[in-house]
Amino acid sequence: MPLGSAIDSRAVGSLWFSQLVGHLKSMTHRAMRMVFAASLSMAFVQPALAGSPAELISSFRLQHGEIRVTSDATLNRIALEQARAMAAKEKLDHGVLGSFSTRMASSRAGRAAENIAYGYDNFEKTLGQWIASSEHRKNLLLHKATRIGVASAKDASGRRTYWAMEIAGDYEPPPSKKKKLEKKLERAENVPPSAKRKPAASKCHINLLGLCI
């Protein structure tokens, strides 16, 4: 019995060790699958999180047959001024800094639209709000728009974020060199006669054979 017991004890110990190793292997495989799945998830989510407002809006526009937009420094400035003014007055209003046409004059755009909002800290959720609203969605899909400006600002408490988006297109082409030259010639031709230089008077009293006497 003692020998038999010893043999039985080693057999049980061996069986327990085998089960433990199998369990650890199973846990390791599950952990590796979870890490792999998490890596795939991050790989798909990260590009969307890293996308700029111009890229996110362009993606939405391309899905609905409109052209891509690019970030514009002037529109970003206009959007930032609007967002800061709304945050300072804690008021969601397009006219907080004056009329929209006056604020957009420096952009030299032929057509433009503006979306504003407050609440969310990140742009993705704010864009979702605009997409869900028919009027804001219409502005996002402004026909032939080519440039975009987006900015945000927090109120004095730091708890509320205000957003402004300016989208524009139909920009005036810069005047060509030929047109600039034509304008200069036109200005020269429009000089009044009194302003034109008179020929210098001759000092010759007698002109004999080309000699001035």
Image (cartoon, rainbow, N blue to C red):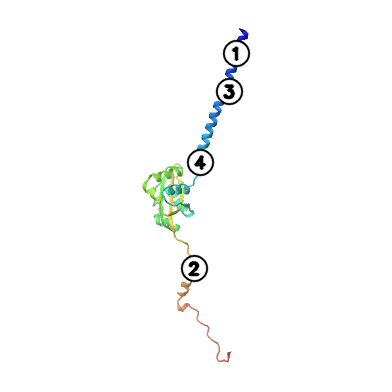
Residue 139 placement, left or right of 7: left
Q: CA distance from mark 3 to mark 1?
A: 18 Å
Give the residue type that dot 2 points to.
Lys
Q: Would you say the residues marked 3 and 2 are in contact, meaning their CB atoms lie under 8 Å apart?
A: no
**Which residue, given by chain and number where applicable, does mark 2 sit on?**
178
Amino acid type, mark 1: Ser
Task: State the image coordinates of residue 133 (x, y, percent, origin top left).
Answer: 37, 45
Q: Could you tell which of marks 1 and 4 lies nearer the N-terminus?
A: 1
Q: CA distance from mark 3 to mark 4?
A: 37 Å
> Which residue is nearer to you in this view: 171 or 104?
171
Report helix, strand or loop for mark 2.
helix
Nearest-to-viewer mark from 2 and 1: 1
* N-terminal label among 3 and 2: 3
Pointer 1: what residue? 9
Secondary structure of the residue carrying tag 1 is: helix
What residue is shown with label 4?
A: 46
Rendering coords of residue 164 (x, y %)? 43, 49
Q: Does the CB distance between marks 4 and 2 fall below 8 Å?
A: no
Look at 49% across and 69% down and name the residue there.
181
**Separation of marks 4 and 2 at Cα, in angstroms:** 49 Å
Whether residues under marks 3 and 4 lie with C-beta atoms below 8 angstroms apart, the answer is no
Residue indicated by mark 3: 21
**Residue, far top:** 1
Contact, CB < 8 Å: mark 3 with mark 1? no
Give the mark nearest the N terminus, 3 or 1.
Answer: 1
